[in-house]
């Protein structure tokens, strides 16, 4: 598996451990949306995700390496999945022409939402975008094309090169 | 068709160099990604882009919540100059940074002209 060191033990908090409930994360998102509006909140959360993704790609040694799905997917699963920070499970990254399609599930953004909810990925989209931008060296624009909240098996994001 | 960011960059560069008291400009997507930028050194175009789109969006919300109608422009006046955010169609937000000595009428006119030019490149 991966050689990336993701702290499993309680390193940031002695008693409560390094994880916090999705309930609190969602409350932060909803609170920001109420204060700033959905669009401004989404911009901020995507920007925050991009920063996190870029930082993660650097930590994983992926900078400028290009899209090699066989290498990136296990690394992201390790870093963001069950053994990592549990943001989401990245199942697939596919290059289709100029665009890149990423399929993920159990995303923190979709968690706890009722079926049919119009909610889209924000922080998760930004985090994956940040990783891919750092990996490809290109600026991308991500758009969610499928959602587990609207009949999909995965949350699918399509990334296109900007400009 | 892909957006020609090189041409957008040239338009911004010309605008910044040819307009008195303008110190920088950037064109960003409504979701906060940079399309082209000509900013003073030390300003991070990605941060500026996210901030610009968020402010314009917040302005739109203020317009709605406080019954001010549709928002065309957001104007930030500091003691060292102006930051003016103008909607550039559905696909972009235009940010202009100008010094405190800038003549506002001329600045607005130049912004209007540049937006017409930029919209053609975004179409």
Image (spheres, coloured by chain):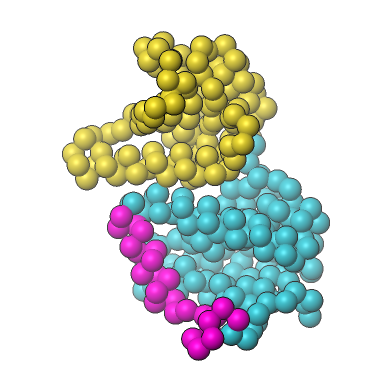
**Residue at coordinates 62% horizontally, 20% vertically from top-left?**
B13
- At horizontal 40% and vertical 70% (from top left) the residue drawn is A26
Q: What stretch of residues is rendered in magenta?
A: A11-35
- Considering depth in this image, is B77 or A85 the residue closer to the camera? B77
Q: Position of residue A135 (x, y in %)?
A: 74, 55
- How far across and how far down the image is residue A117, in percent? 37, 66
> Is B88 on the left or on the right of B45, as rendered?
left
Q: Nearer the viewer, residue B2 or A152?
A: B2
Chain B drawing hue = yellow
Determine if residue B65 is in view: yes
Check if residue A17 falls in the magenta segment: yes
Residue B57 at x, y percent in the picture = 37, 43
User: Residue A148: where, in percent of width, then height?
Assistant: 48, 71
Pick the quarter of the image with the N terminus of chain A: bottom right
Q: Quadrant of residue A18?
A: bottom right
Which residue ends up furthest to the left in the rendered image?
B67
Assess whether residue B114 is covered by the magenta stretch: no
Q: Which chain is cyan?
A: A
């Amino acid at each position: 598996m991966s050689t990336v060191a993701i702290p499993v033990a309680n390193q940031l908090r002695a008693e409560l451990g390094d994880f916090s409930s999705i309930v609190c994360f969602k409350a932060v998102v909803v609170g920001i949306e109420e204060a700033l509006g959905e669009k401004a909140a989404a911009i901020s959360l995507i920007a925050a995700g991009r920063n996190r993704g870029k930082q993660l790609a650097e930590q994983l040694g992926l900078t400028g390496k290009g899209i090699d799905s066989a290498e990136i997917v296990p690394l992201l699963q390790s870093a963001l999945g069950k053994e990592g920070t549990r943001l989401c499970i990245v199942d697939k990254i596919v290059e289709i022409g100029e665009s890149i399609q990423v399929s993920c599930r159990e995303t923190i953004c979709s968690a706890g939402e009722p079926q049919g909810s119009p909610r889209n990925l924000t922080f998760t989209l930004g985090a994956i975008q940040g990783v891919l931008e750092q990996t490809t060296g290109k600026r991308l624009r991500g758009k969610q094309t499928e959602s587990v909240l609207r009949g999909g098996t995965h949350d699918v994001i399509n990334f296109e090169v900007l400009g | 068709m892909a957006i020609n960011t090189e041409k957008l960059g040239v338009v911004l560069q010309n605008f910044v160099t040819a307009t008195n008291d303008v110190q920088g400009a950037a064109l960003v997507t409504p979701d906060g990604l940079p399309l082209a930028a000509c900013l003073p050194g030390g300003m991070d175009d990605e941060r500026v882009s996210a901030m610009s789109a968020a402010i314009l969006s917040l302005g739109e919300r203020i317009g709605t919540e406080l019954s001010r109608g549709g928002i065309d422009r957001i104007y930030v006046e500091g003691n060292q100059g102006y930051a003016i955010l103008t909607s550039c169609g559905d696909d972009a937000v235009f940010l202009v940074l100008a010094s405190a000595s800038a003549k506002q009428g001329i600045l607005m006119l130049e912004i209007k002209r540049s937006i017409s030019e930029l919209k053609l490149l975004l179409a």
